[in-house]
Structure formats: structure tokens, C-alpha cells
């Protein structure tokens, strides 16, 4: 009986997770990624602003790897699906920094709006775009010197044919809740998006033509926000998420989608793909057991135990003295049962689910079609 059930579950999970994933072939020469910890593959750590300890990275890289996760991020799964190697972080200069198929400028803690002295990351969106411009001009300079570096850096036409991916905005909203009212935050969204638009236009001026933009997830479901802002049960929705945070995320997403439409209309030689991460993640959190998870909100790696296993004073992997007692924020025994890894970031298992849903093409606007020059062979 148990075996029958688990075979059924495996088949069920297979078809729910990978309905069409294998049937889309992408044809991008390179990927340039911009964002925050949701897609940082090592910039904040390489920049020397923070360090992370095990159990970060435990399930896949077997070392913290610079990612705020137990394993792979959504961007890693997407690179895999596009038959490309994982993106190297721009600031990661040790080892074998090969940027042939692109470069990652995302850094944990980054915001769209310019960083201030209390920001976790100085690499706000405008800075990431400036880093890209510097990267591109260095590449062109090296290419002009002959073939010596060709296998490490993009070819000249990769900049116009490559994919530009974005996952940023979460920290602008989540950070604001510590000092502003919900109304103030909602009113600030156009200013945040105006700054985003400025960055997109700078990239367009640098020949970027394929834009793939993730909207922001249900911030109110992150353990950290439930712990800090959800102590009054009237502030929580049916799923146990903080309503105000999710309301801000949804308004941000509506305006982001409208911006993508506007830019698509202005730049007829571009492809703008808006991806609805919010819907995928909220479906995962509401229907977690159907997708093979046991904990939608509680952090796998943290301190304090159920119901949240989160304590803002002690980060996943750290040991500290609290009230005279030495305590450690440890990982749970099986992170694949958890949606949330460390209170702020998703587990690899959750990231794999989200990526598989993105790859169905059902959550993008416009939906994937064979008319997109970089999407070959879509079989539904
Ligand atoms: C893939 O894209 C490149 C240009 O970026 C193009 O030359 C090539 O023909 C494309 N491949 C297919 C199979 O369409
Ligand atoms: C949960 O699943 C049900 C049934 O498929 C669906 O109608 C609902 O929208 C899902 N919940 C969320 C928040 O996506
Ligand atoms: C520390 O002490 C406070 C007040 O007695 C208590 O609420 C809290 O749970 C204690 N924390 C730890 C880590 O034991």
C-alpha cells in the first residue's frame, strides 16, 4: 500500500513538475542577469560584504557557494534548461571565471532604488547596470586584441542576441515595511519602477533586445516577515501570510507588468517577457502538500523551533550566545520538505518547482510562442 502510494506520488509529481519542461528549446548565446539574493550566485559574498556558513549549499554544491540557499537557485535551473553552464558572478575573480555564456550581476540585498548607507548591498540596480556596461566595454577591448580570450568572454554579437534577466524589487518593498506605512509603500511603487525603467533603457542603449523579467513573490509569506509583522493574527491571510506585504507585492507586479507592456510598445525591435513568479509561489505555498512539501512557511534552517523556526538575532548556520546560552541556527533534517530555507530564501526543492512552472510557459506574458526567435521547438 505504501509502495503503491509512493509510486503514484512519484508519477504525479513528475507530471506536475515537468509537464512540458523538456519540450522547449532555447537558443540564447548568453545570459546577463540582474537582481538580488533570489538570483545571486556569489556577488555579495565575493564583494566581501558578508559571509555565509554551512549548511548553506549542503544539498548540491556541498559548500556555501555564494548562494543564499541550500542548493541551486531558479536562475541555475533555467540555465540548465537552456543548456548553458551556471552563471558566474561578476565579482568572483578566483578560480576559473569563465564569462563566455554570460555574467551575473545580481547581489543579495540589492534594491532597485539607489542604496543608502544602511543598505545590505551597495550594488543597487543602477550600479549593476553600470557594472554590465563596464563588463561589455572590457570584453570588446579584449576581443579587439585577438583570439587569446575568446573562450572566456562573450563574442561581440552575444550582447544583442543574449537574454537579459531580472529579478529585483523584493528588497525595496520588504525593507520599506520597517519604516513606512502600507499606504506610503504603495505610493512609492511608481518611483521604484521609474528607476527600473531607467536601467532597462540604459541596457537597451547597449543593444539589449531580449528582456525576461520576473515579478516579485508573495513577500508576506516569507518566515522573516511573518515573524516580525504577523504577530497580530488579524494581519494574516488564510495561508498565514502577512496581507499588507502581499498587497504591496501585487500592486508592484501590476505596475511592473504595465511597464513591460509600455516598453514593448515603445521598442518594437525587442522581446519583453514578464514572468509571474508571484502566482507560482503563492500556488506552491497554498497547495504545498500537493507538490510534495510539508512546510510552506516554517524555515528549515533557523532557531526557535515550530511554528516558524526563525529568530532574527541568529542567522542560519551561525552560533551565538543568547541570554547566556550558546545556541546554533541549524538546518532541518530534510530540506526538500520545506519551501523556506532560512526565513528569507526558498529551498532548492522550492526553486526547482518554481523553475519547472516557469518553463511551462503558462506564467509568462506574452506566453512562449514559436515566433520568438530564441524559442525553438515548443511542443505542447
Ligand atoms: C540560434 O541563434 C543564432 C543567432 O543567435 C542563429 O544564428 C542560429 O541559426 C539559431 N539556431 C537555430 C536552430 O535557429
Ligand atoms: C490551489 O489549488 C487550487 C486547485 O488547483 C487552485 O484553484 C488555487 O488557485 C490554488 N491556490 C493558489 C493560491 O494558487
Ligand atoms: C531570553 O529571555 C527572554 C526573557 O526571559 C525570553 O523571552 C527568551 O525566550 C529567551 N531567549 C532564549 C534564546 O532563551
Image: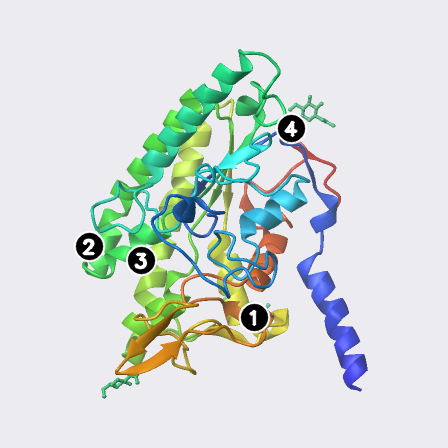
User: Taking 301 as reference, is 357 left or right?
Assistant: right
- Looking at the rendering, which quadrant does residue 323 occupy? bottom left
| Mark nearer the N terminus (3 vs 2) | 3
| Mark nearer the N terminus (4 vs 3) | 3
Which residue in the structure is indicated by mark 4?
Answer: 373
3D distance between C-alphas at marks 2 and 1: 37 Å
> Mark 3: which secondary structure?
helix
Q: Which mark is residue 174?
A: 3
| Mark nearer the N terminus (4 vs 2) | 2
Q: Which mark is residue 184?
A: 2
3D distance between C-alphas at marks 1 and 3: 24 Å
> Mark 4: which secondary structure?
loop
Q: Are marks 4 and 1 in contact (CB under 8 Å)?
A: no
Residue nearest the observer in this picture, 349 or 216: 349
Instruction: Give the percent coordinates (x, y) of residue 311.
Output: 34, 74
Residue nearest the observer in this picture, 380 or 198: 198
Which residue in the structure is indicated by mark 1?
Answer: 335
Residue nearest the observer in this picture, 52 or 229: 52
Amino acid at each position: 500500500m505504501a509502495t503503491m502510494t509512493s509510486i503514484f506520488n512519484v508519477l504525479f509529481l513528475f507530471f506536475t513538475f515537468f509537464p512540458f519542461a523538456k519540450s522547449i528549446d532555447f537558443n540564447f548565446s548568453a545570459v546577463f542577469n540582474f537582481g538580488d539574493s533570489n538570483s545571486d550566485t556569489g556577488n555579495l559574498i565575493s564583494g566581501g560584504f558578508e559571509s555565509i556558513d554551512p549548511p548553506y549549499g549542503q544539498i548540491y554544491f556541498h559548500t556555501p557557494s555564494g548562494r543564499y540557499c541550500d542548493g541551486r537557485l531558479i536562475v541555475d535551473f533555467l540555465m540548465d534548461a537552456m543548456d548553458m553552464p551556471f552563471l558566474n558572478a561578476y565579482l568572483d575573480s578566483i578560480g576559473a571565471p569563465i564569462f563566455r555564456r554570460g555574467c551575473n550581476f545580481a547581489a543579495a540585498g540589492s534594491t532597485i532604488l539607489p542604496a543608502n548607507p544602511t543598505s545590505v548591498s551597495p550594488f543597487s540596480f543602477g550600479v549593476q547596470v553600470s557594472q554590465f556596461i563596464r563588463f561589455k566595454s572590457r570584453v570588446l577591448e579584449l576581443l579587439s586584441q585577438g583570439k587569446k580570450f575568446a573562450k572566456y568572454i562573450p563574442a561581440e554579437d552575444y550582447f544583442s542576441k543574449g537574454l537579459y534577466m531580472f529579478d529585483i524589487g523584493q528588497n525595496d518593498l520588504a525593507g520599506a515595511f520597517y519604516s513606512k506605512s502600507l499606504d506610503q509603500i504603495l505610493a512609492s511603487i511608481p518611483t521604484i519602477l521609474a528607476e527600473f525603467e531607467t536601467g532597462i533603457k540604459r541596457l537597451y542603449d547597449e543593444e539589449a533586445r531580449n528582456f525576461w523579467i520576473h515579478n516579485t513573490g508573495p513577500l508576506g509569506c516569507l518566515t522573516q516577515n511573518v515573524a516580525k509583522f504577523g504577530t497580530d493574527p488579524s494581519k494574516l491571510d488564510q495561508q498565514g501570510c502577512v496581507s499588507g506585504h502581499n498587497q504591496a507585492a501585487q500592486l508592484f507586479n501590476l505596475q511592473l507588468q504595465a511597464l513591460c507592456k509600455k516598453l514593448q510598445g515603445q521598442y518594437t525591435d525587442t522581446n519583453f517577457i514578464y514572468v509571474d513568479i508571484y502566482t507560482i509561489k503563492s500556488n506552491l505555498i497554498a497547495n504545498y502538500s500537493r507538490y510534495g512539501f510539508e512546510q510552506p512557511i516554517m524555515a528549515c534552517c533557523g532557531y526557535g523551533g515550530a511554528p516558524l523556526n526563525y529568530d532574527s538575532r541568529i542567522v542560519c548556520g551561525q552560533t551565538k550566545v543568547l541570554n547566556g546560552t550558546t545556541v546554533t541556527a541549524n538546518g532541518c533534517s530534510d530540506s526538500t520538505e520545506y519551501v523556506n530555507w532560512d526565513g528569507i530564501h526558498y529551498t532548492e526543492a522550492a526553486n526547482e518547482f518554481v523553475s519547472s512552472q516557469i518553463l511551462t510557459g503558462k506564467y509568462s506574458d506574452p506566453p512562449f510562442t514559436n515566433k520568438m526567435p530564441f524559442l525553438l521547438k515548443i511542443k505542447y
